[in-house]
Amino acid sequence: MGSNSDGYLVPCAYCIALLDFISAMLFAIISGVVFARHGHWSALLALIFTLFWMLIIIVLLAGIYRRKLGLIRFWLVFTCLGILLDGFILLYGLTLAISVNWEGVKITVLPFVGLAVEMTFVYIIYLLYLDMIDYSASESPYEEKYRERSGCEVEYAEEEEKPPLDRKDLKRMEKQAKERMKRDKAVLKKLQKQMRK
Protein backbone atom coordinates (compact mmCIF):
# COMPACT_ATOMS: atom_id res chain seq x y z
CA MET A 1 0.00 0.00 0.00
CA GLY A 2 2.82 2.38 0.77
CA SER A 3 0.75 4.80 2.82
CA ASN A 4 1.21 5.74 6.45
CA SER A 5 -1.39 3.16 7.51
CA ASP A 6 1.12 0.33 7.21
CA GLY A 7 2.60 1.57 10.49
CA TYR A 8 -0.34 0.71 12.73
CA LEU A 9 -3.70 0.54 10.96
CA VAL A 10 -3.08 -2.62 8.94
CA PRO A 11 -1.79 -4.70 11.89
CA CYS A 12 -4.67 -3.37 14.01
CA ALA A 13 -7.13 -4.30 11.26
CA TYR A 14 -5.73 -7.84 11.11
CA CYS A 15 -6.02 -8.14 14.92
CA ILE A 16 -9.59 -6.87 14.80
CA ALA A 17 -10.49 -9.39 12.11
CA LEU A 18 -8.85 -12.17 14.13
CA LEU A 19 -10.71 -11.21 17.33
CA ASP A 20 -13.97 -10.92 15.41
CA PHE A 21 -13.40 -14.35 13.87
CA ILE A 22 -12.67 -15.89 17.29
CA SER A 23 -15.88 -14.43 18.73
CA ALA A 24 -17.81 -15.71 15.71
CA MET A 25 -16.32 -19.18 16.24
CA LEU A 26 -17.34 -19.15 19.92
CA PHE A 27 -20.84 -18.03 19.01
CA ALA A 28 -21.04 -20.78 16.37
CA ILE A 29 -19.96 -23.42 18.90
CA ILE A 30 -22.53 -22.24 21.45
CA SER A 31 -25.27 -22.10 18.79
CA GLY A 32 -24.33 -25.54 17.53
CA VAL A 33 -24.40 -27.05 21.02
CA VAL A 34 -27.79 -25.47 21.80
CA PHE A 35 -29.19 -26.69 18.50
CA ALA A 36 -27.81 -30.21 19.04
CA ARG A 37 -29.33 -30.43 22.55
CA HIS A 38 -32.69 -28.79 21.98
CA GLY A 39 -33.17 -28.67 18.21
CA HIS A 40 -34.81 -25.25 18.47
CA TRP A 41 -35.24 -23.18 15.31
CA SER A 42 -33.75 -20.04 16.90
CA ALA A 43 -30.47 -21.87 17.57
CA LEU A 44 -30.40 -23.01 13.92
CA LEU A 45 -31.05 -19.45 12.80
CA ALA A 46 -28.22 -18.21 15.05
CA LEU A 47 -25.90 -20.87 13.61
CA ILE A 48 -26.71 -19.87 10.02
CA PHE A 49 -26.21 -16.21 10.90
CA THR A 50 -22.86 -17.04 12.48
CA LEU A 51 -21.67 -18.81 9.35
CA PHE A 52 -22.62 -15.71 7.35
CA TRP A 53 -20.78 -13.58 9.93
CA MET A 54 -17.64 -15.68 9.51
CA LEU A 55 -17.89 -15.26 5.73
CA ILE A 56 -18.09 -11.48 6.17
CA ILE A 57 -14.92 -11.59 8.31
CA ILE A 58 -13.13 -13.54 5.58
CA VAL A 59 -14.26 -10.82 3.15
CA LEU A 60 -12.70 -8.22 5.49
CA LEU A 61 -9.42 -10.15 5.61
CA ALA A 62 -9.38 -10.38 1.81
CA GLY A 63 -10.11 -6.64 1.58
CA ILE A 64 -7.24 -5.79 3.91
CA TYR A 65 -4.81 -8.15 2.20
CA ARG A 66 -5.68 -7.12 -1.36
CA ARG A 67 -6.35 -3.48 -0.47
CA LYS A 68 -9.84 -3.62 -1.99
CA LEU A 69 -12.08 -0.81 -0.79
CA GLY A 70 -15.30 -2.55 -1.81
CA LEU A 71 -14.66 -5.56 0.42
CA ILE A 72 -13.83 -3.42 3.44
CA ARG A 73 -16.88 -1.25 2.76
CA PHE A 74 -19.05 -4.41 2.71
CA TRP A 75 -17.75 -5.41 6.18
CA LEU A 76 -18.27 -1.88 7.50
CA VAL A 77 -21.89 -1.76 6.33
CA PHE A 78 -22.68 -5.22 7.68
CA THR A 79 -21.06 -4.52 11.05
CA CYS A 80 -22.74 -1.13 11.45
CA LEU A 81 -26.12 -2.69 10.73
CA GLY A 82 -25.33 -5.42 13.28
CA ILE A 83 -24.40 -2.84 15.92
CA LEU A 84 -27.64 -0.94 15.30
CA LEU A 85 -29.68 -4.13 15.55
CA ASP A 86 -27.89 -5.24 18.73
CA GLY A 87 -28.39 -1.82 20.31
CA PHE A 88 -32.07 -1.83 19.41
CA ILE A 89 -32.57 -5.32 20.85
CA LEU A 90 -30.73 -4.41 24.07
CA LEU A 91 -32.72 -1.21 24.54
CA TYR A 92 -35.94 -3.06 23.78
CA GLY A 93 -35.07 -5.67 26.41
CA LEU A 94 -34.37 -2.98 28.98
CA THR A 95 -37.66 -1.19 28.33
CA LEU A 96 -39.60 -4.43 28.83
CA ALA A 97 -38.35 -4.77 32.40
CA ILE A 98 -41.16 -4.03 34.85
CA SER A 99 -38.95 -3.43 37.86
CA VAL A 100 -35.28 -2.61 38.21
CA ASN A 101 -33.14 -5.57 39.22
CA TRP A 102 -29.66 -4.25 39.93
CA GLU A 103 -28.02 -7.62 39.43
CA GLY A 104 -29.70 -7.80 36.04
CA VAL A 105 -28.51 -4.28 35.23
CA LYS A 106 -24.92 -5.30 35.98
CA ILE A 107 -25.26 -8.24 33.61
CA THR A 108 -26.96 -6.08 30.98
CA VAL A 109 -24.12 -3.54 31.01
CA LEU A 110 -21.70 -6.13 29.57
CA PRO A 111 -23.41 -6.28 26.13
CA PHE A 112 -23.26 -2.47 25.98
CA VAL A 113 -19.53 -2.64 26.73
CA GLY A 114 -19.27 -5.20 23.92
CA LEU A 115 -21.06 -2.78 21.59
CA ALA A 116 -18.65 0.00 22.57
CA VAL A 117 -15.68 -2.27 21.80
CA GLU A 118 -17.25 -3.25 18.47
CA MET A 119 -17.79 0.44 17.61
CA THR A 120 -14.12 1.09 18.38
CA PHE A 121 -13.19 -1.74 16.02
CA VAL A 122 -15.42 -0.29 13.31
CA TYR A 123 -13.81 3.11 13.81
CA ILE A 124 -10.29 1.69 13.36
CA ILE A 125 -11.31 -0.19 10.21
CA TYR A 126 -13.02 3.00 8.98
CA LEU A 127 -9.76 4.92 9.51
CA LEU A 128 -7.98 2.29 7.40
CA TYR A 129 -10.71 2.63 4.75
CA LEU A 130 -10.31 6.43 4.65
CA ASP A 131 -6.53 6.10 4.49
CA MET A 132 -6.85 3.69 1.57
CA ILE A 133 -9.17 6.15 -0.20
CA ASP A 134 -6.67 8.97 0.34
CA TYR A 135 -3.82 6.81 -0.88
CA SER A 136 -5.65 5.65 -4.00
CA ALA A 137 -6.60 9.26 -4.79
CA SER A 138 -2.99 10.43 -4.45
CA GLU A 139 -1.54 7.74 -6.69
CA SER A 140 0.17 8.82 -9.83
CA PRO A 141 -2.32 9.50 -12.63
CA TYR A 142 -0.04 7.59 -14.99
CA GLU A 143 -0.39 4.33 -13.09
CA GLU A 144 -3.04 1.96 -14.32
CA LYS A 145 -5.34 1.02 -11.45
CA TYR A 146 -6.71 -2.47 -11.13
CA ARG A 147 -10.33 -2.80 -12.07
CA GLU A 148 -12.43 -3.64 -9.03
CA ARG A 149 -15.46 -5.12 -10.74
CA SER A 150 -14.12 -7.09 -13.64
CA GLY A 151 -13.65 -10.62 -14.78
CA CYS A 152 -9.99 -10.31 -15.66
CA GLU A 153 -7.02 -8.10 -15.14
CA VAL A 154 -5.29 -6.75 -18.21
CA GLU A 155 -1.82 -5.31 -18.25
CA TYR A 156 -1.28 -2.57 -20.77
CA ALA A 157 2.01 -1.88 -22.46
CA GLU A 158 3.53 1.45 -21.55
CA GLU A 159 2.82 4.19 -24.02
CA GLU A 160 5.68 5.00 -26.29
CA GLU A 161 7.05 8.47 -25.99
CA LYS A 162 5.99 10.67 -28.85
CA PRO A 163 8.78 12.15 -30.91
CA PRO A 164 9.30 15.88 -30.43
CA LEU A 165 7.30 18.11 -32.74
CA ASP A 166 9.11 19.85 -35.54
CA ARG A 167 9.08 23.60 -36.10
CA LYS A 168 6.24 23.60 -38.67
CA ASP A 169 3.92 21.73 -36.33
CA LEU A 170 4.70 24.08 -33.48
CA LYS A 171 3.97 27.14 -35.67
CA ARG A 172 0.70 25.60 -36.85
CA MET A 173 -0.38 24.83 -33.28
CA GLU A 174 0.52 28.36 -32.18
CA LYS A 175 -1.55 29.82 -35.01
CA GLN A 176 -4.54 27.64 -34.08
CA ALA A 177 -4.27 28.69 -30.45
CA LYS A 178 -4.22 32.37 -31.38
CA GLU A 179 -7.30 31.92 -33.60
CA ARG A 180 -9.13 30.19 -30.76
CA MET A 181 -8.22 33.04 -28.41
CA LYS A 182 -9.60 35.59 -30.89
CA ARG A 183 -12.86 33.65 -31.20
CA ASP A 184 -13.14 33.36 -27.42
CA LYS A 185 -12.57 37.10 -27.00
CA ALA A 186 -15.26 37.84 -29.59
CA VAL A 187 -17.75 35.58 -27.83
CA LEU A 188 -16.86 37.15 -24.49
CA LYS A 189 -17.49 40.66 -25.88
CA LYS A 190 -20.89 39.58 -27.23
CA LEU A 191 -21.83 38.19 -23.85
CA GLN A 192 -20.74 41.37 -22.09
CA LYS A 193 -22.86 43.44 -24.46
CA GLN A 194 -25.88 41.23 -23.83
CA MET A 195 -25.41 41.55 -20.08
CA ARG A 196 -25.38 45.36 -20.30
CA LYS A 197 -28.75 45.45 -22.07
Image (cartoon, rainbow, N blue to C red):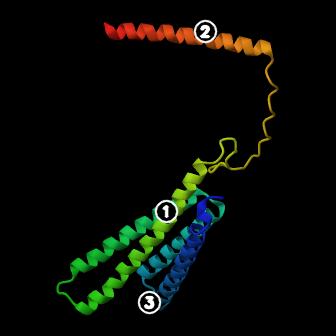
> Front-most of 98 and 104?
104
**In this view, 178 is above or below 104:** above
The reply to whether the C-beta atoms of the residues labelled 2 and 3 are less than 8 Å apart is: no
Q: Amino acid at mark 3?
A: His
- Residue hosting label 1: 126
* Image quadrant in which the C terminus is located: top left
Task: Give the quarter of the image for residue 167.
Answer: top right
- What's the amino acid at mark 2? Glu
The quadrant where residue 101 appears: bottom left
> Count the marks: how many?
3
Which of the two labelled residues, at mark 3 and mark 1, occupies the earlier sequence position?
3
What residue does disc 2 label? 179
Task: Tell me which label, 2 or 3, sits earlier in the chain.
Answer: 3
Which image quarter is the N terminus in? bottom right
Q: CA distance from mark 3 to mark 1?
A: 40 Å
Q: CA distance from mark 2 to mark 3?
A: 86 Å
